Amino acid sequence: MSDQSSVVLPPIAPATAHVIPFTAAWRDPRTWGAGLLVAAVVFGTYADSLRSSFNYDDEVNIIENPNYRGFNAERLQWMFTTFHMGHYQPLSWMSLGLDYLIWGQEPFGYHLTNLILHVANAVLVYALALAVLGARRGAAAVPEQPRWLTPVVAGLAALLFANHPLRVESVVWITERRDVLSSFFLLLAVLLYLRAQVSVRVGGWAVWLAGAIVVFTLSLLSRAMGVTLPVVLLILDWYPLRRLGGRPGGWTDTQARRVYLEKLPFLILAVGFAVVAPLAQQSAAATVGLAEHGVAARLVQACYGLVFYLWNTVIPYGLAPLYRLRTPLPVTDVKYLVPVVLVVAGLVGLRARWRQWPWLAASALLYFVLLAPVLGFAQAGRQEVADRYSYLPAVVGAILAGAGLLRVWQDAGRRASAPAVTAAATLAVAVLSILTWWQSLVWLTPESLWRHAVRHAPSATAYQNLAAVLAQQGRLDESIEQSRLALQDEPLHERAMRGLAKALTDTKRYSEALPVWEQLIKHAPDEAQVRFEYARTLQELRRPFDAIAQYREALRLDPDLPGAHVNLGGLLLAQDRVDEAIMHYKRALARQPDHADAHYNLGNALLRRGDYELALDAFRVALVARPDFPEAATNLAIALARLGRTDEAEQAYRDILRRDPDRAVARYNLARLLAESGRRDNAVAELREMLRRNPQDALARRALQALSTTQPAEP
């Protein structure tokens, strides 16, 4: 371009290398203006995502996880050593820890950081597009074009990357902080590498290259997705830099060997993290073995993925948070055969034309290499594809589209139509921006997300995630319906079985819940919590001996299960095995000292044994642990009465009735206390108050009749 000065490559590069004009372009105010406009448009498109709640795995990674909250030595050690949820991402954990220090657990701040990083990535893609689109070969002339054109086209390319519905998952899902953060450093590393290749002095070249290596390390510490960078840089060295190939011996001569040697630090880092990544996945049991998902199936899945991302780039409809991987993969389905044919045809075409169309060959290679870690060759997780996997590969397509638009302007035969083509490109970006905004609204709440998922990509996991959301909202009947749909789709889906059984139990549909718990017992025989819930259901169905056996089995599997100790103690107490019951209550309290129900039940057992003082202490502790515990308050009054502390017992009953005048047990006990202490008129008054509040209370009626027979009340 006429406004960009020529620069010299370092000695290791061949004389025919392309020039990447950084400094001249950025001296033009229009360059900065277009970059700021890109940032503003991207931020505005995603602004509504700042209203989103925590979603999907955020509950496990953010809400329930205390380990990332701050930067003391213990938490930093955890960040740099954990494989939590199958990922090694210490720098991403540090960024989340910083969010926590600023925002606590307010999702707005976490979403804001994700969005800022995405905006920064859009600006980096803009800078990359400027560099690549502004490249020119040596001193060869470039057709005259408007000075504003390259910044505008680069801006459109950046927006095509950033404002696309496929990007929404990476930006709006807080757990995917690793995606936007690692991509930020990786894009910056590529820019620094390109800058190194146009440095005037060898010393300058080394500084820029060292910067690229450092930033690449930061990318890998955020997520290992960038392990393919050494290959990416070699492709860029071939085209557009032309440091490799293009001359006799251009792949093996001395200069080429220096180019390869330059990649050694990148390669060492990439290999190290490429080893760590699968270890992290294996630690979370996320990998899928070859016996279940064979080599042929993985190749077919890879072809499907390559076409899936291209197709949804052009027609982004029906995007979902989860696309289930079925095993064994039905490789003969049309869904998979068509992508295989398209990929093979594309390879044949590129093989025939790669010398004539190096730009297309380089783009295709970059696209494949950037996707390769997530195409299923080393399958991790049960997703066939994922929107978030397209984040980095989309940069290639966006810049390629920008190059095509620029070519239209540079081609003398097409210049007349160039403004119309540019307008069409701008309209396409505007439409994609609207679709992106619409897709971001899908992620506003967990319910909106999973309702969208079951509509566009139904699966057992999607149904069950919606069921879990509905259960948290107390909408148990709707939750049961979704869990049943999940089990229709996948009969042995463990979380769906668990969710269905729990919802049926919580709605007191114990007969329906029982066979589901029994199926879960067969599926997960060594899981204590399942045994506990099964025993609780048996207890509610009045099968005490079966329930006792299951509680004992649950405690064998997990002796630290307070609820099992408490419930088992209750069943033993009902059989007058008081000492055994007390032993279990004490074991529950040894593991959870503030367990209000355990203190309350211990007090009941001590009452039964006649240890009134100890029972009194147990009820008092239960009330400290749970101040609003009327049963404990009532039994405390009983213990006081048994100890002969009548006035205190009366006051305790009256305190209960002051808070809850309809508590019939407390009023009846108060009436008995008054009658036994000779205040029969007062007792009669309390019983009459009981009948006024509940005329059908047979107990109060019989007691009143007995008192009236013994000593008629005054009219």
Image (cartoon, rainbow, N blue to C red):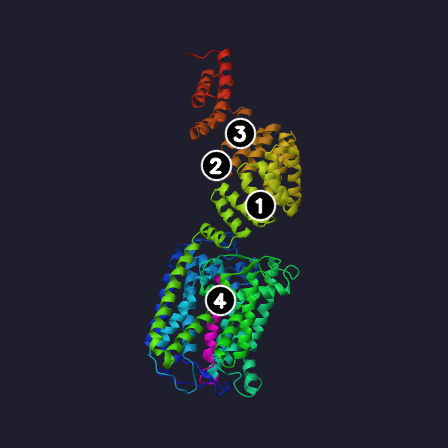
Relative horizontal placement of residue 236, taking residue 571 as reference (left or right) = left
Callout in the foreground (4, 2):
4
Q: Give the class, few, some or many, for how many residues have Cα within 10 Å of label 2's Cα (few <14, many ≥20).
A: few
Choose the circle earlier in sequence order: 1 or 3: 1
Quadrant hosting residue 100? bottom left
What number is the disc on residue 498?
1
On-image quarter of the C terminus: top left
Work out how far the residue at label 4 is from the one at label 2, CA to CA, in angstroms: 60 Å
Callout in the foreground (4, 3):
4
Choose the circle earlier in sequence order: 4 or 2: 4
Choose the circle earlier in sequence order: 1 or 4: 4
Residue 3, how many percent across, how many down?
35, 82
Work out how far the residue at label 2 is from the one at label 1, CA to CA, in angstroms: 32 Å
What number is the disc on residue 635?
3
Choose the circle earlier in sequence order: 2 or 1: 1
Residue 519 belongs to the span the image colors magenta? no
Residue 555, how many percent across, how many down?
65, 42
The reply to whether the C-beta atoms of the residues labelled 2 and 3 are less than 8 Å apart is no
Work out how far the residue at label 4 is from the one at label 3, CA to CA, in angstroms: 70 Å
Q: Give the class, few, some or many, for how many residues have Cα within 10 Å of label 3's Cα (few <14, many ≥20).
A: many
Query: Which residues make up the magenta segment?
Result: 177-202
Q: Give the class, few, some or many, for how many residues have Cα within 10 Å of label 4's Cα (few <14, many ≥20).
A: some
Disc 1 residue type? Arg
Residue topped by disc 2: 627
What number is the disc on residue 310?
4
Disc 3 residue type? Asn
Residue 396, how many percent across, how many down?
47, 71
Image: 129 above or below 53: below
